[in-house]
Image (spheres, rainbow, N blue to C red):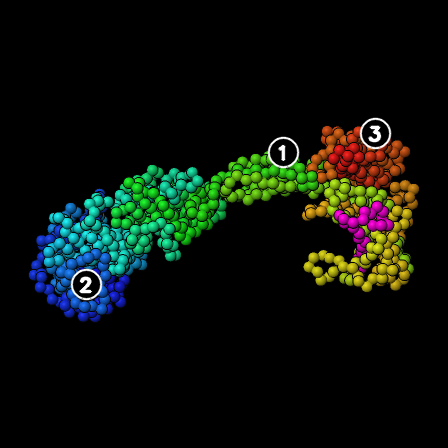
Amino acid sequence: MIRGLLVLFAAAALGPTLQAQSADPCGASRSVDTRTKPGTYPTGDAVDVYRAALDLLYIDGARRPSVLVVLDTVEPGGDGPCPVACSRVWLHKSRIDTSAILAFAHRGPKRPRIAKFAYRIPIVLVSSDDLNRMRRDGDRYIAENHLPNNLPDLPEQLAFARRFPGAWGYMQFSKVGFSTAHTQALVQIAQWCGGSVCSSREILFLKRIGKSWRVIERIPDFSAALEEKGNLRYRGPAGRIPTESEIVGDTSSRAVIRLESKDAAAVYRAVLDSLYHFQGSAPRMVVLTDRVRNPDDSLPVPRTRLDSGLLQKYRFLGSVRAKPDRAFTYRLPVKILLGDSLSRLENLPPPIDDQTGMSPSPWFGFRKSFPGAWGMVGFSRVAFNLPHTQAMVYSHHECGQYCGNGDTWVLERKGERWRVVERIPRPEHSLWEPGFFPLRYVGIDAKPQAYHHRRAYAVFMNAVTNRPLPFLKLSARRNSTEHQLYTADSVGRVDLGAIPFTGIVGLKAGCPDQSQPDSLYVLEFLFSPGPDTTLSTQIDFRQCFRTSEPHRLTGAQAFISPTEARFVFPRLPASDYWDLPERQTRPGTTDYFWMVQWRNADPHANGPIELWLSANQKPKGTEIHSFEELISGRPLDVMFECQTCDEPAVYADPREDHQSVTARIDTGRIVFSLRGRRVVNSVFPKVPKSVTFFRMVRHTPAGKPTSLEIEESQSVVVNCRSSDSTAASRRRCDLPTNPQDTTLKIDSTAPRRLKVVALSYDGASLMRNLDVRVLSEDLRNSTVSASTGQSGDFSVLQAPRDSIAIEALCPGNRRDQTDTSGKLALYLAPGRDTTVQLLVDERRCPAISRRK
């Protein structure tokens, strides 16, 4: 029965090999056994051979099982050497005496009982009936405790662990084959530590050195080391087939045999020193685990020159998980978390400050249970060369569901100190979750300062002048809830402080004109770990500008008759078009547009909607100094609305007769003309009640993506004639508008209080202590002088139905001089008190312009 059990788990790994062996012609010779009589075993030198084998497998300094469980009968043997010619050659590396090979091959089918022999660890003998009884006990224990029985060897594992809690598994000996001189020996050892997931069978080659026996070579027959449960330990060979045999003893050297457990612990410490040292920081504790994700790639060939056989030994042991040793010590506190205990951490809720909407995860519980740890790390068994001067080991650090890195380490020993000489990265999962910090990804490719709470700074510049904005007031909102106020320093710099790993901050700057408390969204910064950073952002305060009045043009007129249509734009000095300071200081392209728009009576009709005239000045070309030069040769286009475009768009009628549709200059005004009944009727099948005049100047400096635009408009009643005598008569043809708030009655004769806020041309600041004058067209006292004072604004009372001009005087000018840095023309209709903005550009002042 016992032989059947061992053959069963051997066949699971080497079924085809066993089948070929059973057909071997040498099988018949093994039925003859002339060297052993029936009775008990071992006797004589076989006892010492058994002890030497047990020393190799189970004695490692103070690390040893508390009891050895041995099957009470001898196994006749499995695959191994044949006493006659065989189809398969038995491979090994040592020089083995032929007589020892023949003696081992002639073991025969007899199965003597094991006699108890003295050993430093207590030995317990079990029978095949004991094993069957333990399996039944395991089935009963699983059923009574309602445990999942989803593993083939689970009943035996549970029952064995309950009966022998200090054992690492059980084993079975074969008979020993000795050389004629009894100086060499071969013995087979079969070990069970979990069945199909943990078991082995190997042949040991031993030599007698003086009065002692020493194991020289381990020759694998098969092995399985997928998983260790509880106290069960894999103690089999570091290979699967005879070609992967391992030399473990050196008869020519007198060096003291080094303890594997001691050197393995030193190797693990050296790896932890490297793995858990990240840019000068280290965790507060180390968590060891048996949960190791084995690499799914092939190992690159190490650059380090390795002893013969070490790489082959690592290829096996690198996938064998090492159970954490509770006696392991390190310079940091060490905790142990076994893989089957990780699920209990899912029931630990995240802290209140971690309610980030993340799905339930055991890593919240891990962080709470192991504060200061960077994750947990599992190791493979360490592979050593024979003198223990080189070692290889695999580690897997886990820091989240999709966070972890595996590494193969090559180490060398100088004296008693092990040091890492090569780190070979294996497949990693670098999706680190900042919400789990201080857990962190520590792969070799981890970015520098990846877990540094960076300090963030922001520098704010004026988008128009490209100069810093000193002492700027800002309000910040972090993660949609936290509010904070900042003030920039003298160079426009704001210290946002140490930022968290995750989140977002948004900053707003108030508009200088706070008569209506507007603000601009000036910065949005997504938090992330890394080095300290400085953000530079430009603020365009021109977005704060508000159109003071809907009608900035004055004096436009529209006439449409059956045979002629005539549209007259207001008179405007040419200097307002091409003497732009931006054009003087920042050469570029200046575009000019004049438009007349109207609504179709039938919204579904696809008729014309506007007249459009455009012109421009290029950075390089002939300078233009008059309207006549500017629009000479420019066509006046009749525009239609595109009905099939995704975005609103217009297009010109390509069939238009530009001899009948023209633009010209008449007494300093631009006039659009349509002549002829056919042309007028095609453009205006029905005469509109009103039209809107637009004029716009756009200047784009060379090489700059942004541009400056000035736009003005006026809507007038068609075929309305006005007198030029007073402002009121000039505005008589303006399209009437209703006040926004009609709930309060407006006195049409009461004067309006006009508040004027003076702003710099870039919109960034109030113009304080600025001298201004207000010019009235109708009042007898036509000029009023004022100052914006420290508040940057002033107020005046003006009668309604009056056109006024507000002018900002250049510094140092007398108030009767004409040099101005800003102008605003208004028509005051009846209404409530209002606030307007006066834009001031001191570059228009001759003295300042010369200094610059």
Of residues 800 and 795, which is closer to you in this image? 795
Q: Are marks 2 and 3 in contact (CB under 8 Å)?
A: no
Residue drawn 80% across and 35% down? 846
Whether residue 620 appears in magenta in the rendering, the answer is yes
Label 3, on which residue?
814
Q: Quadrant of residue 647?
A: bottom right
Which span is picked out in magenta?
608-630
Where residue 323 appears, x then y in whole percent?
Answer: 29, 48
Q: Is residue 350 above or below residue 129?
A: above
Q: Quadrant of residue 111?
A: bottom left
- The amino acid at mark 2 is Pro
Disc 3 and disc 1: Cα gap in Å? 35 Å
Q: Do tag 2 and tag 1 residues touch (Cβ < 8 Å)?
A: no
Q: Earlier in the sequence, mark 2 or mark 1?
A: 2
Residue in the image at 30% along x and 43% along y: 413
Marking on residue 81: 2
Q: Callout 3: helix, strand or loop?
A: loop
Q: Quarter of the image containing the C terminus?
A: top right
Q: Which mark identifies residue 491?
A: 1
> 10 Å neighbourhood of mark 3: few (<14), some, or many (≥20)?
few
Depth-wise, is mark 2 or mark 3 nearer the camera? 2
Q: Residue at x 43, y 51 (%)?
A: 429
* Mark with earlier residue (2, 3): 2
Q: Position of residue 657 (x, y in %)?
A: 85, 62
